[in-house]
Amino acid sequence: MEINTSNAIQDTLHQAKGDVGSDWIMHHILDSHQLDFAPFGSIQLPHLSLFGFDISITKHVVFLWIVAILLLITFKIAASAYKKSRIPHGFANFIEVLIVFVRDEIAKPTIGKGYEKFLPYLLTVFFFILFSNFIGLIPNGATVTSNISVTTTLAILSFIAVQAGGMMKNGVFGYFKGLIPSGVPAWLLPIMFIVEILGLFTKPFALAIRLFANMTAGHIVIFALIGLIFFMKTYFVAPVSVAFALFIYLLEILVALIQAYIFTMLSSLFIGMAVHQDH
């Protein structure tokens, strides 16, 4: 790794002159091979390849590790608190509130009987998205949920959970048979089957795009508002730009919570629909 201070200073000067344009915004939104620590400099990340495949460590990969480590530390602290006392306090109590919320307000109502099997996955997804969203709001941080590869992977995992849950409860044949509504005319069965199969894939696709688009859009708006100061080359617009950027930033905090809830709730809802096809 190499600390590159001169490049960061040059980038800052270009931004101040308004010569960067939209590249400045995309530089902060997209994945990259360096970690920025503005205004102090940046760290170049190594480029790696294996059998011709690019497996380089990028900014989003680093923040994925950070999120994973924070999750392990968080639940280690919460678990340790339960060993000391049956009634945890402070931080452990706060984590318990979120866990109970996912269990009682998401898993139970949407899956119903047998929800316990899917609760560990739903909790993992909820806390991963929540931590990822909030870390992206920290200065020089990166929102990994604004990477389509990350949201697609999460959607694929939800897709696997949905199909596995449906097949375990109804059997492979019974699950696919249950996709077709009862009372459909025989000549419509081939068309309905194709439509329902396509529907299985559009659900995770919608999950991935919704999370990706919402987390990306907020950051673009914030950087665009701040960029108006440099693009218009006047400080008179600064109070308005900063005020609106601060408002969007506060709104992003709410969006970070809502998106974690929506992704988890929809995943749980799809699992419930697959498990209880007769309802």
Image (cartoon, rainbow, N blue to C red):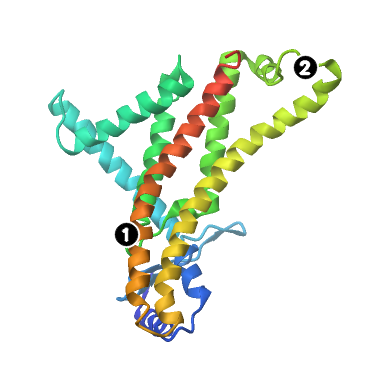
Residue 72's quadrant in the figure? top left
**Amino acid type of the residue tagged 2 in the rendering:** Val
Determine if residue 152 is in view.
Answer: no
Which of 185 and 34 lies nearest the eye of the viewer?
Answer: 185
When asked about the image quadrant of residue 109, the answer is top left
Q: Check disc 2: other Cα within 10 Å, few if <14, some if 14-19, many if 20+.
A: few
> Which quarter of the figure has residue 195?
top right
- Dot placed on the residue nearer the N-terminal end, 1 or 2: 1
Q: Which x, y percent locates residue 125?
A: 43, 37
- What is the x, y in percent for residue 217? 49, 58
Q: Secondary structure at mark 2?
A: loop
Please give the name of the residue rendered at 34% of the width and 70% of the height, measured from the top-left corner.
242
Position of 2 with respect to 273 (left or right) is left
Picture coordinates of residue 243, whole percent (x, y): 33, 67
Is 190 left or right of 257, judged from the image as shown?
right
| Residue corresponding to mark 2 | 184
Give the percent coordinates (x, y) of residue 105. Answer: 38, 27
